[in-house]
Image (cartoon, helix red, strand yellow):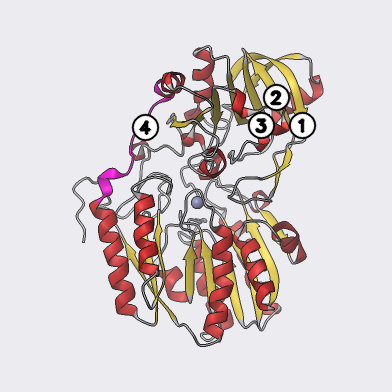
């Protein structure tokens, strides 16, 4: 079997200022995709493994992927999309297509880029060529995506530790379809309900996942997945959806999706809406016995569209006079460059962070001792994406009033302690380890953290949905409209 592999992957926070250009996307073509993903716990890595196991000819075409950010410029999206579609058209015919997409991509003129990509892929390959799609559970999933694909496989866990397995399942499902063993039939139930980013490691989502997995054990049920949706997007359809897939039984797929959606709806008050502010989180961390305590500044998570240069939490930590604390990392290429020029051992005056937008705080004007510098390169060790090569550009370890602060040249959330190790920091020796991430860090830090306390500072990825002003979202939607009823 000859299978096309490719995708355009973006989680769009439409509240970010400006537009995302094509140059912000890491663009891989052909063998570059194999080199980047073989043996890596990514969707593509899983697809590569399964194709090899089945003896299939997997043809890597084009994968474009950017850190979550503002709406994609319309022309940029069309260029990236068409590079993928041209490959499917020109290097065909293919026996099947495996698309790796996100689900929350928005471009100028396109509220649903994944629906657009799948629909256009279908127009190229025709009705009889299977299309399987892996997705992120933060997708604002639409009926269009489901209608034009044979099978959609959103990841189940947040942190997304099952990307590799979903990639494998995509290819394994193609084998079953080719053998005539299954005819996937899906139903998407859309709830009028939006949630802030919420881990699946804890209830209620951990328990809802177990209900989905129990459904998958039933005869004739192929898949059942809760999509969390992505709240910071001012497009008509955002929020929670449930996707159930059966073996050629549309009524059963609908019944299962509706049943799980009903359970989520009945438990809606259990989803977190407000968390501690930085000024509340720091004393709570200090009052916790044992170490390390992870303080995660989710509201400035670059993995959700936050700039990663917000200063609210670090400012509060400095004001609290913390000593046994480290912060990794804050995005400021200018300060990283300044430290590289000054060299380790130097003391420099810096204006750190707070340079992207006012919401995330003013720059910190402080004196910093340059403890160390690095190239910012390491191999990810978290169970999520293990093996991926990370490059944060020039980095510096600064001592600011006794707090060890890491400064990077590229936006990224922290997924495991590797970035600290790179700079000689053993997080186990610190009382407080502060990072910018919503939940993905849990895969890498839960095994070593004594406690995890989230600090919800003002930001583009805040848990407080009232902080966003929506104009285009379908109303009513819970909890923005508390009286929303369903069904
Ligand atoms: Zn996600």
Where is residue 188, by image quadrant? bottom left
Q: 116 and 182: which one is in front?
A: 182
The reply to whether residue 117 is in sight is no
Identified at 61% across, 28% down, the residue is: 427
Label 4 element class: loop
Crowd rating for badge 4 (residues with CA inside 10 Å; few <14, some 14–19, many 20+): some
Q: Which residue is tagged 1? A: 374
Identified at 29% across, 55% down, the residue is: 264
Q: Earlier along the polypeptide chain: callout 1 or callout 3?
A: 1
Mark in front: 3 vs 2: 3
Residue 453 is covered by the magenta coloring = no
Q: Which residue is tagged 3? A: 420
Q: Which mark is residue 275?
A: 4
Crowd rating for badge 2 (residues with CA inside 10 Å; few <14, some 14–19, many 20+): many
Label 1 element class: strand
Q: Which residue is tagged 2? A: 397
Q: CA distance from mark 1 to mark 2?
A: 8 Å
| Mark 1 and mark 2 residues within 8 Å of each other at the beta carbon | yes
Q: CA distance from mark 1 to mark 3?
A: 11 Å
């Amino acid at each position: 079997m000859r299978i096309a592999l490719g995708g355009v992957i973006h989680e769009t926070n439409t509240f970010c200022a400006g537009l995302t250009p094509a140059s912000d996307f890491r663009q891989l073509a052909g063998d570059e995709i194999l080199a980047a993903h073989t043996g890596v716990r990514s969707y593509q890595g899983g697809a590569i493994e399964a194709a090899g196991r089945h003896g299939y000819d997997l043809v890597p075409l084009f994968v474009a992927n950017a850190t979550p950010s503002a709406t994609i410029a319309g022309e940029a999206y069309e260029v990236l999309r068409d590079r993928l579609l041209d490959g499917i058209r020109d290097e065909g015919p293919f026996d099947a297509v495996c698309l790796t997409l996100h689900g929350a991509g928005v471009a100028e003129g396109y509220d649903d880029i994944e629906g657009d990509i799948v629909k256009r892929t279908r127009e190229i390959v025709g009705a009889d060529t299977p299309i399987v799609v892996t997705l992120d559970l933060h997708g604002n999933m639409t009926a269009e995506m489901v209608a034009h694909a044979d099978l959609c496989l959103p990841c189940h866990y947040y942190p997304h530790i099952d990307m590799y397995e979903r990639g494998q399942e995509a290819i394994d499902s193609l084998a079953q379809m080719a053998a005539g063993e299954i005819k996937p039939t899906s139903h998407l139930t859309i709830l009028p309900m939006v949630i802030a980013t919420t881990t699946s490691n804890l209830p209620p989502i951990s328990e809802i996942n177990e209900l989905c997995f129990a459904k998958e054990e039933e005869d004739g049920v192929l898949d059942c997945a809760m999509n969390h949706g992505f709240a910071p997007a001012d497009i008509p359809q955002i929020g929670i959806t449930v996707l159930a897939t059966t073996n050629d039984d549309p009524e059963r797929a609908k019944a299962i999706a509706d049943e799980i959606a009903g359970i989520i709806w009945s438990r809606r008050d259990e989803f977190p809406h407000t968390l501690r502010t930085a000024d509340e989180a720091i004393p709570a961390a200090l009052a916790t016995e044992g170490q390390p305590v992870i303080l995660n500044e989710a509201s400035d998570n670059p993995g959700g569209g936050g700039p990663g240069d917000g200063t609210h939490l670090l400012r509060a930590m400095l004001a609290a006079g913390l000593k046994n604390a480290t912060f990794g990392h804050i995005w400021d290429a200018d300060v990283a460059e300044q430290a590289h020029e000054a060299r380790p051992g130097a003391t420099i005056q810096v204006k750190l962070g707070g340079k992207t937008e006012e919401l995330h705080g003013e720059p910190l004007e402080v004196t910093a001792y340059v403890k160390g510098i690095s190239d910012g390169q390491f191999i990810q060790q978290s169970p999520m994406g293990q093996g991926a090569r990370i490059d944060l550009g020039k980095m510096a370890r600064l001592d600011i009033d006794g707090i060890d602060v890491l400064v990077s040249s590229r936006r990224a959330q922290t997924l495991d302690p590797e970035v600290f190790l790179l700079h000689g920091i053993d997080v186990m020796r610190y009382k407080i380890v502060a990072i910018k991430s919503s939940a993905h860090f849990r895969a890498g830090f839960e095994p070593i953290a004594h406690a995890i306390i989230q600090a919800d500072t003002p930001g583009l990825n805040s848990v407080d949905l009232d902080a966003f002003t929506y104009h285009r979202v379908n109303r009513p939607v819970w909890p923005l409209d508390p009286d929303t009823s369903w069904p």
